[in-house]
Amino acid sequence: MKPTHRADPPRFADWLLEWFCTPHLLEEVQGDLYERYQRDLRLVGEAQANRNYIRNVLRFFRPFALKRNPSDYPTPFLISPIMIRNYAKTSLRNLVKYKASTLINLFGLTLGVTACLVIYLITHYELSYDTFHPDSDRIYRLVGESQFNKTAEKHPVGFIPNAVPAAIRKEITGIGTVAAFHNIESEVLIPNGSEKPTKFEHRRHGVDNAEIVVVDPTYFDIFTYKWLAGNPKTALNDPFKLVLSERKARKYFGNLPIEQIMGKELIYQDSVHVHVAGIVQDWTQPTDLTFTDFISLATVRASQLKKGINLDQWDDNWSASQAFVKLPAGATPKQFTAQFQRFGKAHYPNEFKFAPALQPLADLHFDEDYQDNYTRKAHLPTLYGLMGVAVFILLIAAINFINLSTAQSAQRAKETGIRKVMGSSRASLIAQFLSETAFLTLVAVLISLLLVHPILSTFQSLTPKGLTFTLFSAQTGFFLLAVIVVTSLLSGLYPSFILSSYVPALTLKGQAGLAVGRKATLRKTLIVFQFTISLVFIIGTLIVERQLSYMRNKELGFNSDAIVSIRPPWGEKGKVLAQRIRSLSGVERVAMEWFPPMGQAFMVTKLKYQGKKQAVEMDVSAKIGDENFIPLYQLHLLAGRNYVKSDSLREIVINAHYAKALGFRQVNDALNKLIEFDGKKYPIVGVVADFHEQSFHEKMGPVFMGYMPHARNLGIKLSTKGKQMSELKTTLASIENEWKAVYPDNRFEYTFLDDSIAQLYEKEQKTSQLVHTATGIAILISCMGLFGLAMFTAEQRTKEIGVRKVLGASVASIVALLSTDFLKLVVIALVIASPIAWWAMNQWLNDFAYKIDIDWWIFALAGLLSVGIALFTVSFQSIKAALVNPVKSLRSE
């Protein structure tokens, strides 16, 4: 038997009565009218009962019933100390009394608040990058748009030709302050008299931040540092001068007083001797400008740095070449657009085009269109998605609170009636119920604070490097206060209004109220909402996992198994090391190369082919390696042969995509044709099958391979046939020994190619882990709410279950009876969640050039999973209720 549905009297009539009737008469008058309404319902039907109710309300519009001055019936101020103490006492008493719902709500709120707090810390940290600079809204990075020829695509570039910053400073009117800088990589030597110099290793690529730069003196006019020593106006005006950050000065010179560090000599790139001319305090806020060693730009022309940094270069751009601009106050980037266009046309009249532009400093940490070699890009949509996840998780927890509180309302109706009879106003009752929610939320926040540190440590791989949690910060305090207020209102406001609206005359007679049907509908709606969110997460998890599996298992076009990359220092010793490693028993093959076939580092250059009708010139990716490169990576030769051993570039191999782009119908047709590179022509001697050289976000493009000098990196194929992991470790140890024999003063580092490729999908891996975590939390909170509701439903229907069992109902039929209603809601949630999840995941997959299809069975599987989870959650209470002795059930009421 389902609970009897009660019709409600016209709401506007109730509002009218509550508005004009004086408070001390309202409860009695309203209770009488409700009783009469119930009688009319039975006797004359709902329509006539409604009319009678309205008429009866209007009859009470008399002078004695009009509102009186509230001071006639004084009540304590709602936030007086006495009332607050009373709220706290009654809240604690009620929370203890209803242990099951309290624990469920506390668990859900703790999960929700903890998720919100962790996500707030991550997003706040990422969004605060480089926001602390004075006049940051006037600071821009000089970027641009390049094009190799008229037919080539235009590319946004975050770096500029070396000669551009100085020319812009002279030719662009009103541009303000311009500062160029260049990243360099170097070990640092500190002379130690007649002893061996003290050496500091260069940074670990992909792990450590960029630290060494060659900068214009104006860099310190744009970015403000606190100077601990030296003159910011003159420190970098001369060649061979250096400014250090305090942290780096301590690293190099220990606890030597700062005054004594001034003038000390350091050596970069083996022969560039510089002297300390200033020390600045490190920034403590998040920044992408993590530089600590500032060498004066004048050093370039006066040292061997000019071999790597050509300050007069106009026709090429490298990621190390950067510049920042600080516009005058009131100036906008738009007013320089015309001047930049004229600048581009004046300096780039030939095929290579470059047009300068300005990128706001605020975009530096997020805009992936402008790549560089020192910033870590954060994915802004992911951050916004995280904020949405936090809101949804907290919302799910709040819904649990609302559902359980309204389900509990019947049990608390008598309490409400007694309080009203004893003189409590509706406002004081609302305050009391809200205080219970606020108290529970406060406890959840306190537990969350204890959990934050362990969670940040556990999920360290998902959080940005440098993120810490400081409890006693104003920002964290404001956030937690906002969470307490919002969560308390979100969770407690509606149940408070419901509980405080009960009429004492009815509740004291055992009637829980008139809005049973309305409350049940609301609870069902909220359950559907909860499971809709959970299902979106489940579908998202399935699709993200499928895409990651697709990327892990798809054929890349080359072999990456058991291949190790090492990076020797510059010089000829690399060939010696390669020869020594080749002689090791556990090594199959060694290739000297610039980069492996696939990875984060790659180089694109311009190649030209003179066809029969016209020349074809395009950007082509260069894979530079010796004659072992193609065999080591097992690239599949479709035509021709591998290039032969040589000391310089003499012949090249291209991929099938490039052969097709050149107009050859058959790959064999490309053999022996001449390709022009850097003013010289080289024959094509082979064509390999296409292979992936970048992540699956990018399509496979034209590639050429050949050997050039300066290919110093080593790709090493380890022998794995019939060998155990311990033997591979022995081989790696042997390689390290050979390294130490050749480079005794250098640190040995290696990376497996598979790991390097996996780093290409770091963002997707993090997304997957975040979606997994959010899914788990959402499902857990939803199921806890469902569990609580199932428990209350079983309690409310105890007598009905007892009657059914006496009449012969089986346990299975009773379980089905109690579970069916909940399962229907889950099915409705699946129908709503499916299009939402499809749209969201389709947007995510659009970023991939190679991706999976979103199949229908994913939604079916998600539905089955959610039904299974819901059934598992509800069945425990259903079975428990069905197994109760009917004698006890019938005695329960």
Image: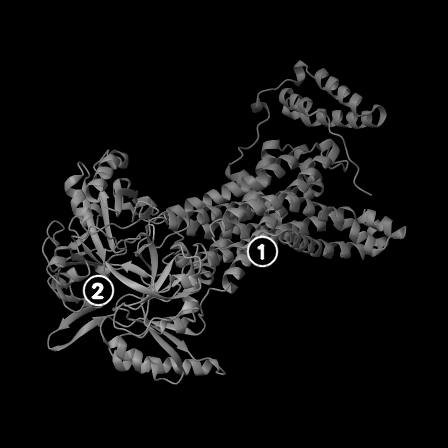
Q: Residue at x 39, y 46 (%)?
A: 475
Which image quarter: residue 662? Answer: bottom left
Q: Secondary structure at mark 2?
A: helix
Labelled disc at residue 32: none
Name above or below for residue 73 compared with residue 778: above
Name the residue rendered at 56%, 58% in the picture: 546
Report the side of 752 relative to 105 (left or right). left
User: In the depicted view, which residue is nearer to us: 562 or 361?
Assistant: 562
Q: CA distance from mark 2 to mark 1?
A: 50 Å
Check residue 250 in the rendering and tell me which mark sits there, or answer none. Answer: 2
Q: Percent from the top left, x then y, of residue 531?
A: 63, 47
Against 391, residue 564 (above or below) is below
User: Mark 2 is on which residue type?
Assistant: Arg
Q: Residue 542, which numbered label?
A: 1
Specify the color scheme.
one colour
Q: Residue at x 42, y 44 (%)?
A: 478
Q: Position of residue 452 (x, y in %)?
A: 46, 56
Q: Few, some or many C-alpha atoms within 10 Å of disc 1 (few <14, some 14-19, many ≥20)?
A: some
**Visible residue check, residue 692:** no
> Going from the N terminus, do you reach mark 2 or mark 1 first?
2
Please give the count of numbered marks on the rendered protein: 2
Q: Residue furthest right?
A: 807
Neighbourhood count class around disc 2 (C-alpha, 10 Å): few under 14, some 14–19, many 20 upward: some
Q: Residue 164 at what x, y percent from top left?
A: 20, 47
Q: Position of residue 769 (x, y in %)?
A: 50, 58
Q: In this image, 401 relative to 381: left or right?
A: right
Residue at the spot x=64%, y=51% of the render? 856
